């Protein structure tokens, strides 16, 4: 074997992520690298509404993947920030809150600091090693600065991503010719797909007749959670549940469908436990003086009866949500504005194609 052939063979082995095994849920890690300058307002607002749908549809794979999402917002030198990084998380409440904090602002000159964004996506995210799917989605509408002498270079950072087994997908918003050429190059180097979509993301607000009911059920589902853990952990979970109930209707409808399909609604949820474990946990919390309000003052048996009733109530709510979600999807498919090239559709389609190579079926 020639030295060149050997080098290529080693590179191919090191850049290809190992296939998942059947011993544990396959890990799917996704970093959305989003241009958050002023021109990207439509896409960012749409992503806030659709992130729940994206997560739910990726979670439909078999075996069901363990999905983790990271966010990298980027702008340019002289803006409020150059990059803002949120590490991988499997907590969709946290992901939604972080995404909701992004607002489109800044920019000015057309190029943005794409190279810095890709560097941070590769080096500041806690990517796993070994089996699993790791994907970066670069989403923007402007080409990178190539005149900065600050050591960041998108060519090198894409190569570093591949060395770590990370695929780089690109989604171009709008029709900037210079950006299109670079986005195509990055996708080719990153062994991903290139997609071009409407400048505003192709995700107009779509209101359906069942949205209000789904939003109400989203709140009712959150109310079935009985948080255990320490007082600090209980307070944190309560804040997340309150934020979930306060979502705008469109996002709440999407969140309801996500949590109806999810394996759990919150960390440390006593309702998830089998009855015998519920009793042990309640007794432990009572001894520590940390019993949640819903079971405080109850005997252990009374608390278990309450928790089991909540479990039954939850199953009823989830079944109702799933029925309404089917009606919602049918309604949206029938609308003339439904688009196969919208941001969320492109993300789901491309992620599913990459996941299939890891043995995840849809």
Image (cartoon, grey):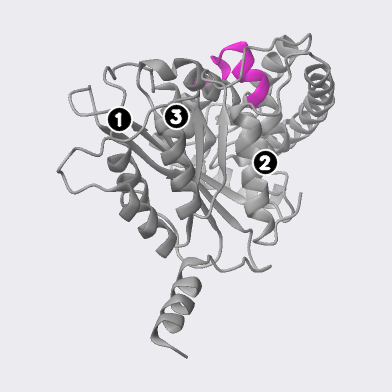
Give the labeled residue for mark 1.
112
Q: Nearer the viewer, residue 229 or 172?
A: 172
Image height check: is 121 above or below 216? below
Q: Position of residue 200 (x, y in %)?
A: 52, 18
Q: Gap in Å between the C-alphas at discs 1 and 3?
A: 15 Å
Report how far apart the C-alphas of labels 2 and 1 lie in the structure. 27 Å
| Closest to the observer, 331 or 244 | 331
Disc 2 and disc 3: Cα gap in Å? 24 Å
* Residue at image location 57% in from the left, 12% down from the top: 248
Q: Is residue 254 magenta?
A: yes
Dominant secondary structure of the magenta stretch? Answer: helix
Contact? badges 1 and 3 (CB < 8 Å): no
Please determine whether, in this image, residue 235 is positioned above or below residue 40.
below
Mark 2 or mark 1, which has the lower sequence index? Answer: 1
User: Disc 2 vs disc 3: Cβ atoms closer than 8 Å?
Assistant: no
Mark 2 or 3 closer to N-term?
Answer: 3
Residue in the foreground of this view, choosing between 135 and 220? 135
Q: Of circles 1 and 3, which is in front?
A: 3
Region of the chain picked out in magenta, as a range: 243-255
Residue at 82% x, 16% y: name it.
331
Circle nearer the N terminus (1, 3): 1
Placement of 64 over or under 171, stated as above or below: below
Residue 340's quadrant in the figure? top right
**Pointer 2 residue:** 349
In the rendered image, which residue does mark 3 sit on?
Answer: 177
Rate crowding at label 2 as few (under 14), some (14 to 19) or many (20 or more) other CA atoms within 10 Å.
some
At which x and y percent is residue 204? 62, 13
């Amino acid at each position: 074997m020639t030295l060149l052939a050997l080098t290529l063979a080693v590179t191919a082995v090191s850049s290809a992520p190992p296939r998942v095994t059947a011993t544990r849920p396959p890990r799917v890690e996704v970093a959305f690298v989003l241009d958050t300058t002023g021109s990207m307002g439509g896409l960012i607002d749409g992503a806030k509404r659709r992130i729940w749908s994206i997560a739910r549809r990726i979670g439909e794979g078999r075996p069901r993947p363990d999905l983790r999402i990271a966010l990298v917002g980027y702008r340019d030198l002289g803006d409020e920030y150059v990059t803002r990084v949120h590490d991988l998380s499997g907590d969709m409440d946290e992901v939604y809150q972080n995404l909701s904090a992004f607002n489109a602002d800044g920019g000015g000159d057309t190029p943005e600091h794409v190279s810095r964004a890709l560097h941070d996506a590769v080096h500041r995210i806690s990517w796993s090693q070994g089996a699993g799917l790791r994907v970066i989605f670069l989403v923007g509408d402007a080409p990178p600065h190539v005149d900065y002498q600050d050591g960041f270079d998108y060519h090198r950072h894409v190569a570093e991503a591949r060395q770590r087994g990370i695929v780089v997908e690109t989604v171009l918003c709008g029709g900037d010719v210079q950006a299109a050429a670079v986005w195509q190059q990055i996708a080719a180097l990153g062994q991903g797909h290139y997609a071009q979509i409407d400048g505003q993301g192709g995700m107009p607000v779509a209101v359906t007749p069942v949205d209000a009911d789904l939003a109400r059920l989203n709140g009712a589902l959150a109310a079935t959670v009985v948080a255990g853990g320490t007082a600090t952990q209980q307070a944190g979970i309560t804040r997340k549940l309150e934020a979930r109930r306060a979502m705008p209707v469109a996002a709440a409808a999407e969140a309801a469908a996500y949590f109806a399909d999810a394996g759990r609604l919150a960390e440390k949820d006593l309702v998830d436990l089998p009855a015998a474990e519920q009793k042990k946990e309640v007794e432990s919390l009572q001894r520590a003086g940390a019993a949640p309000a819903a079971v405080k003052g109850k005997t252990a048996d009374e608390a278990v009866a309450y928790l089991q009733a909540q479990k039954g109530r939850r199953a009823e709510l989830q079944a109702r949500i799933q029925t309404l979600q089917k009606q919602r999807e049918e309604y949206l498919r029938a609308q003339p504005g439904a688009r196969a090239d919208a941001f969320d559709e492109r993300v789901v389609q491309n992620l599913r194609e990459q996941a299939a190579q890891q043995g995840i079926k849809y």
